[in-house]
Image: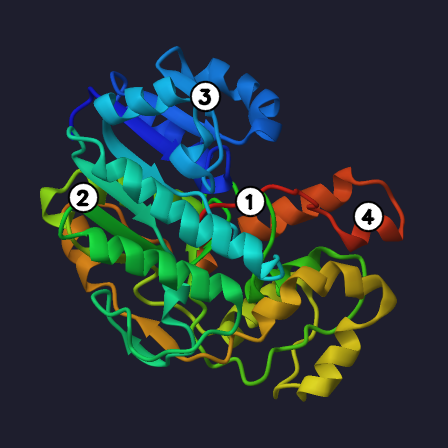
Amino acid sequence: MSSEGLAFVTGFPGFIGRRLVRRLRELRPGLRLALLVKAERVEATRPLLAELGPEVTLLEGDLTRMHLGLAGPDYKRLTREVTEIWHLAAVDDLAADPRRLRAVNVEGTRNLLELAQACPGLSRFHHFSTAAVSGNREGVILEDELEQGQSFGNPYEETKYLAERLVREAQGRLPAIIYRPGIVVGDSRTGEIDRFQGPYTLAILLVASPLSVPLPLPRNGIAPLNAVPVDFVVEAALSIAANPAAVGRTVHLVDPAPISVRRAYELVARRAGKSLPPVSIPHRAAEAVLSLPLLERLVRPQRAAIQLVNRIAVYNPRNMLELLAGTGILCPPFQSYLDRLIDFVRAHYAASAAGPEAAEDPLDADQPAAR
């Protein structure tokens, strides 16, 4: 893609958004970027601009409002100048208010599509969806499939499904690419992550905790752990974005050979010298362990996600493999970077104040991670 033009980005300074913007600046230094940021986060975001350079500007707005909450002249300038849109913003908290999830994930996407259709110079519309749009489906799930009669375990999955449906309907009018990451985990090189969500994080948090408890395996644990490191997600998306053959397609950004949830827990337990039951703990027994006073707050954000690990879903990445062929960009296996994830969490525990509070919530970062 051209190093010139104007890229409009949502989801900054989220976990993926920060890295994607930084890499865009490195790979395409002549590209101008306009970052949509909510009013309450503008001041906290300004210091990040110093490292990004003068080609990057902040626009104070709101994805859920008409014209994205921008002043008339700013919105009109975007329609004249924008050449590509990167839509990463989303609420991904499984416990969030369903009304907020719908407003941001669905109506926000609808508002951004309106902007896209008003931009005559638009060359790409990049939409970050999620593999979770498959809902309760099991078996092999293809990238070209969406509406397959699935149901959803929570409003997050459903609203991301509805948002992707809007983009797919617009693909006949817009040069759109849809990216579906799996469970986005830390950086495979550093272990860094902004906050911990999902079933794999329960094991890591318990290992990093000073508490001596067995690792309760969620049921039989035979389902694939569809985890993918954030650095691979960014590098793969940027490479696919530059490939003309990607326009109009949906791409799973996943590990082509995921290990099982049980295997992931075994690796974590071995690293910590802790125990993993030879058979799955009954659900009630596992709940009793996780309800211990010092564990309850630590585990609370993971409870909704733990219920999802019994889905035996295999995400076929045929489009991803085809579009990345010859680039050298490969998803590293989970076991190759697990130690870095654990080390990162342990470092946060060590830096926290001593006492029970340090074990309760080591990474209490209240910022949305775009996916």
Image coords of residue 107 (percent x, y): 42, 50
Image coords of residue 189 (percent x, y): 46, 42
Per the image, the residue denoted by label 1 is 368
The earlier-in-sequence mark between 1 and 4 is: 4
State how far apart marks 3 and 2 are (Cα). 32 Å
Along the viewing direction, whichever of 205 and 9 lies nearer the viewer: 9
Nearest to viewer (mark 3 / mark 2): 3
Nearest to viewer (mark 2 / mark 1): 1
State how far apart marks 4 and 2 are (Cα). 43 Å
The earlier-in-sequence mark between 3 and 4 is: 3
Along the viewing direction, whichever of 51 and 370 lies nearer the viewer: 370
Per the image, the residue denoted by label 2 is 327
Per the image, the residue denoted by label 3 is 58
The earlier-in-sequence mark between 2 and 1 is: 2
- Give the class, few, some or many, for how many residues have Cα within 10 Å of label 1's Cα (few <14, many ≥20): some
Per the image, the residue denoted by label 4 is 358
* SS state under label 1: loop
Q: Which amino acid is tagged 4? A: Ala
Judge left or right: residue 1 versus residue 9. Answer: left
The residue located at (56%, 17%) in the rendering is: 47
